[in-house]
Image (spheres, helix red, strand yellow):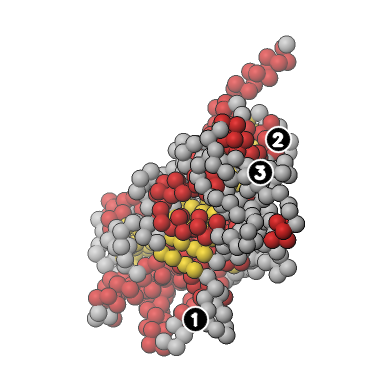
């Protein structure tokens, strides 16, 4: 058997039982690799119950800095007998299986093409600890210690992480360090170390930061001027509001008076939370809510009101598997259609599509600007993979001189001077009307806000021409938005090609690696990363220049492809769907295989078409 050999380039997966305390130990392992200057991208795959069901933690170590899932596992840390067979099946030939050998396993339960490393973890912990809970918790630290020897992760780095975590709690610090060295001592004496895969100190991390998307978007909203947040707890978005509350408590409390310059309300349900945010936006506050697909479903009537009454609202949708309750702790990009056309009647909404925590921070602030500039709901479409997993990304940047874009606000001076004010009147040709805030002028600039039809001066009307004028103006405003939203990012192939690929959001990290792999195989594609809906002219031009365009997304129904066909009137036959929707984050290998197989299947047809053209 030829074992896998790699330095700073492997995938390790931990198979644990939820509630066993393994999550913090596994995160400690990943952070230790980061501290050694090596890029690592971990993902926590967990069940929707509190404890008892299987949970996994997958860490991608990459000298090239890839942040997406590769596909395939080089080392499995198998701590859960329930998932033993499935976990072992994931291992690459020549890979490594590390397991608790306290209870001997029959020979037939192992594969012959992998290296098996057994360590009696339970026996070791039972001999050292008397308390059952300590036995379980410290078993996780013991296996981290063993892995540090097998993979050459520096013990001093892990000890430093302990020192930071348990500062002022010397008893906890000492006990964790002791457990770490229990594992290290056993592995050094009894196991064949180091393995073929290992970690070597490097300088690949640089100034990058390690953060999750939910924290990043909350901080972006804070910097973007949000002062009101209303929410109802729902996985995987709850930590957005929790992070915003922490940051507000730190940065939005007057140091002299102690007055809180913010309002955060945990509402009784999603309907109430969106209602509060709509009311705050109408009153001039920058406001947002954070939710997931089921919450959006409940919010749609209020979203329609905000669209038709033209009230600034920001909605952060951390997508999960649906429909209904679906897979609450799995990831998908399956709310695109639901959000793009949310509510009954003719509606179109702006969607922002961040690829990582850095863009979550940026677009958190951008969304608040766009909501006021366009006077409409803005969706930030993250998902569980971005929102709840820590990721390396570029440091956040903020220009202190940046001014918030409040859009078209008519002042008291302009009203006093007699400037014509029609709340729903398009005077600039961009579909965006002027607005006033409550209290702008004692007697001028007031209007009645309603969800029913009105004329350009906000007067109730059921006249057909007034309705047509209003909804066509809203459509014009949506077209204006195409030039204001974040623009797509083009990556050109190494050589000229007539084949393209479109992708977005959390698919991006895996796509970056897949493009490199495809190029190495001689499959060259121009790539366009979408960053927002509505689509700009650049998207239409890209598709027009490529007769075949793959659309890679994480849902069953090719929802982004549907939007492209519907909004740009593209021939559906030119857009080839590449769909991944099992709830786990998409992998580079999945993308590479899907595109390669399609290209090979189409090759004979392409050759025949070329021959026919030449014969003609």
Q: Residue furthest top?
A: 616
State whether residue 136 is above or below residue 270: below
Q: Which sits in the foreground, 111 or 604?
A: 604
Q: Which residue is mark 3?
A: 425
Assess whether mark 2 and mark 1 are in contact (beta carbons under 8 angstroms). Answer: no
Residue at the spot 60% in from the left edge and 21% down from the top edge: 605
What kind of element bears circle 1?
A: helix
What kind of element bears circle 3?
A: loop
Indicate the quadrant where residue 413 lies. Answer: bottom right
What kind of element bears circle 2?
A: helix
Lower sequence index among marks 1 and 2: 1
Q: Which residue is mark 1?
A: 164
Q: CA distance from mark 1 to mark 2?
A: 52 Å
Callout in the foreground (1, 2)? 2
Q: Residue furthest right?
A: 417
Indicate the quadrant where residue 238 lies. Answer: bottom left
Q: Which residue is mark 2?
A: 541
Callout in the foreground (3, 1)? 3
Residue at the spot 25% in from the left edge and 62% down from the top edge: 104
Q: CA distance from mark 3 to mark 2?
A: 32 Å
Q: What percent of the width, then of the height, locates residue 392?
A: 57, 63
């Amino acid at each position: 058997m030829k074992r896998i050999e790699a330095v700073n380039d492997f995938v390790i997966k931990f198979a644990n039982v939820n509630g066993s305390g393994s999550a913090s130990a596994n995160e400690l392992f990943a952070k230790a690799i980061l501290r050694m200057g090596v890029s690592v991208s971990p993902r926590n795959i967990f069940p929707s119950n509190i404890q008892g069901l299987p949970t996994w933690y997958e860490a991608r170590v990459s000298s090239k800095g890839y942040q997406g899932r590769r596909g395939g596992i080089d080392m499995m840390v198998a701590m859960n007998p329930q998932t033993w067979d499935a976990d072992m099946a994931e291992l690459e030939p020549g890979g490594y299986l590390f397991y608790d050998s306290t209870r001997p396993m029959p020979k037939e339960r192992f594969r012959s093409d992998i290296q098996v490393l057994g360590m009696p973890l339970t026996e070791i912990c039972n001999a050292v600890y008397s308390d059952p809970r300590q036995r379980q918790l410290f078993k996780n630290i013991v296996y981290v210690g063993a892995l540090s020897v097998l993979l050459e992760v520096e013990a001093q780095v892990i000890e430093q992480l302990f020192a930071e975590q348990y500062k002022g709690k010397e008893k906890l610090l000492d006990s964790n360090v002791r457990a770490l060295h229990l594992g290290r001592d056993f592995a050094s004496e009894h196991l064949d170390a180091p393995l073929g895969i290992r970690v070597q100190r490097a300088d690949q991390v640089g100034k990058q930061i390690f953060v999750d998307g939910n924290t990043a978007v909350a901080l972006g909203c804070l910097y973007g001027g949000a002062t009101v947040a209303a929410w109802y707890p729902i996985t995987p978005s709850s930590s957005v509001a929790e992070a915003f509350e922490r940051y507000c408590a730190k940065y939005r409390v007057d140091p002299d008076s102690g007055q809180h310059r913010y309002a955060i309300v945990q509402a009784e349900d999603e309907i109430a939370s969106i209602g509060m945010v709509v009311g705050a936006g109408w009153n001039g506050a920058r406001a947002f809510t954070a939710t997931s697909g089921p919450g959006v479903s409940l919010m749609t009537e209020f979203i329609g009101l905000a669209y038709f009454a033209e009230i600034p609202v920001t909605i952060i949708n951390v997508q999960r598997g649906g429909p209904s309750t679906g897979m609450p702790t799995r990831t998908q990009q399956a709310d695109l259609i639901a959000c793009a056309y949310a509510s009954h009647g003719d509606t179109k909404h702006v969607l922002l599509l961040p690829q990582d925590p850095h863009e979550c921070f940026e677009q958190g602030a951008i969304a608040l600007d766009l909501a006021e500039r366009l006077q409409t709901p803005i969706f930030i479409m993250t998902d569980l993979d971005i929102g709840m997993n820590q990721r390396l990304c570029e440091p956040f940047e903020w220009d202190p001189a940046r001014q918030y874009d409040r859009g078209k606000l008519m002042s008291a001076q302009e009203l006093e001077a007699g400037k014509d004010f029609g709340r729903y009147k398009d005077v600039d040709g961009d579909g965006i009307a002027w607005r006033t805030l409550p209290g702008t002028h004692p007697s001028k600039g007031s209007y009645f806000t309603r969800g029913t039809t009105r004329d350009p001066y906000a007067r109730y009307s059921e006249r057909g021409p007034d309705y047509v004028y209003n909804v066509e103006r809203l459509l014009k405003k949506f077209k204006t938005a195409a030039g204001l939203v974040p623009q797509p990012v083009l990556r050109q192939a190494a050589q000229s090609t007539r084949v393209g690929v479109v992708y977005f959001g959390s698919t991006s990290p895996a796509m970056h690696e897949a493009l490199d792999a495809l190029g190495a195989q001689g499959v060259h594609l121009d790539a366009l990363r979408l960053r927002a809906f509505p689509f700009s002219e650049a998207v239409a031009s890209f598709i027009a220049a490529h007769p075949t365009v793959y659309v890679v997304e994480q849902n069953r129904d090719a929802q982004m492809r549907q939007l492209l066909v519907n909004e740009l009137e593209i021939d559906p036959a030119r857009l080839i769907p590449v769909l991944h929707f099992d709830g786990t984050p998409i992998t580079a290998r999945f993308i590479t295989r899907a595109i390669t197989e399609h290209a090979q299947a189409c090759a004979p047809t392409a050759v025949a078409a070329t021959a026919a053209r030449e014969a003609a």
